Amino acid sequence: MKTKIIDGKSIGEDIRSNLSARVQSLMDQGHRPPSLSVVLVGDDPASQVYVNHKEQACGKVGIISRSYRLPASTSEADVLAVVKDLNADPDVDGILVQLPLPAHMNKFTIINAIDPLKDVDGLTPYNQGLLAWNLPGHRPCTPAGILRLIRSRETDLTGKRAVVVGRSILVGLPVATLLTHAGATVTTVHSKTTHPQSIAKEAEILVVAAGVPGLVDQDWVKEGSIVIDVGIHRTPNGLVGDVQFDQVFETVTAITPVPGGVGPMTIAMLLSNCLDAYGHRARTSA
Ligand code: GUN
């Protein structure tokens, strides 16, 4: 029998070892390795940690990673120039601009400058449009990872009642779209929703990406549901999510832990998108 805990670390490791074998086979055939370029502007401590993890993960599966660490005072024009160079560089398969960006720049302008074929974060309007249309394209990493976690417990989502807490372009909106395309009946609740608990309590699948530590307690959770906690917050008592894990544990059928749930899947899906971008570019270049 499966445990209640959805082990993102182990599912992510399986995906990574599969990717590693694919990269090794490319090397054995004499091809160049895939490559990811990460742009980090400023010194947000959490972003530094995430970017370090992404670089280490690339190294482990044989993807070359290059990082561009720019001071917070960098102008928007200079960041755009870096993105433009990476777009034009034939050795770069994937580009990721780590968010959040400093307040003086417009994240939409910068993301929109990334070549959609190299947009391994799936955040450009082009890739989000392909997602909305349910056509092939790079899917945002965290939402794609969340779907894998849900499907590890429930393969057929047709007709399932799903509630997503949060509406960000990184997680809430795309995860709601992916669940809709998978056949679920999806409601999004957010900071302007009145009585979000009563809506969430109807959910057979509850995805919480609110960015509020411990927001979700047993009043939000339906008996027998699957709960995915996207939050990760550093507190004096250690890392916590958006869900009060101990409070809801008895009620749920399955739940992701923090850490070790969604986080490792984001990285695994990023590596997977990189390899897809590499393959697509190899097939379409002369
Ligand atoms: N900041 C937090 N998560 C992410 C992510 O998945 N992609 C980017 N670009 N920035 C992030």
Image: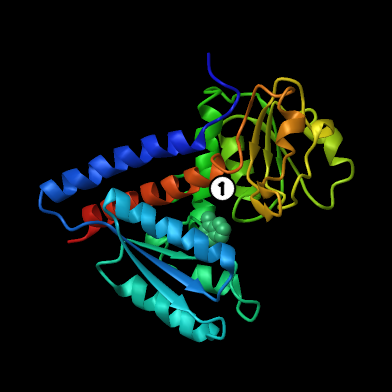
Q: Secondary structure at mark 1?
A: helix
Report which quarter residue 36 is drawn in. bottom left
Tell me if I can see residue 95 in this picture: yes
Residue 39 percent across, percent down from the top left: 45, 70
Q: Residue at x 89, y 40 (%)?
A: 195
**Residue in front for this viewpoint, 77 or 68:** 68
Residue 253 percent across, percent down from the top left: 65, 21
Report which quarter residue 250 is drawn in. top right
Q: List the residue tagged with mark 1.
A: 132
Residue 91 percent across, percent down from the top left: 25, 67
Amino acid of disc 1:
Ala
**102 w.r.t. 176: above or below:** below
Tell me if I can see residue 133 in this picture: no
Relative placement, left or right, of 26 versus 222 is left
Quarter of the displayed picture in which ligand 1 can be seen: bottom right
Q: Residue at x 55, y 22 (%)?
A: 156
Report how many numbered discs are placed on residues in the image.
Answer: 1
Colour option used: rainbow
Residue 242 percent across, percent down from the top left: 71, 45
Relative placement, left or right, of 210 versus 64 is right
**Which part of the image, by quadrant, shows the C terminus?**
bottom left
Classify 10 Å Cα crowding around label 1: few (below 14), some (14-19), many (20 and above).
some
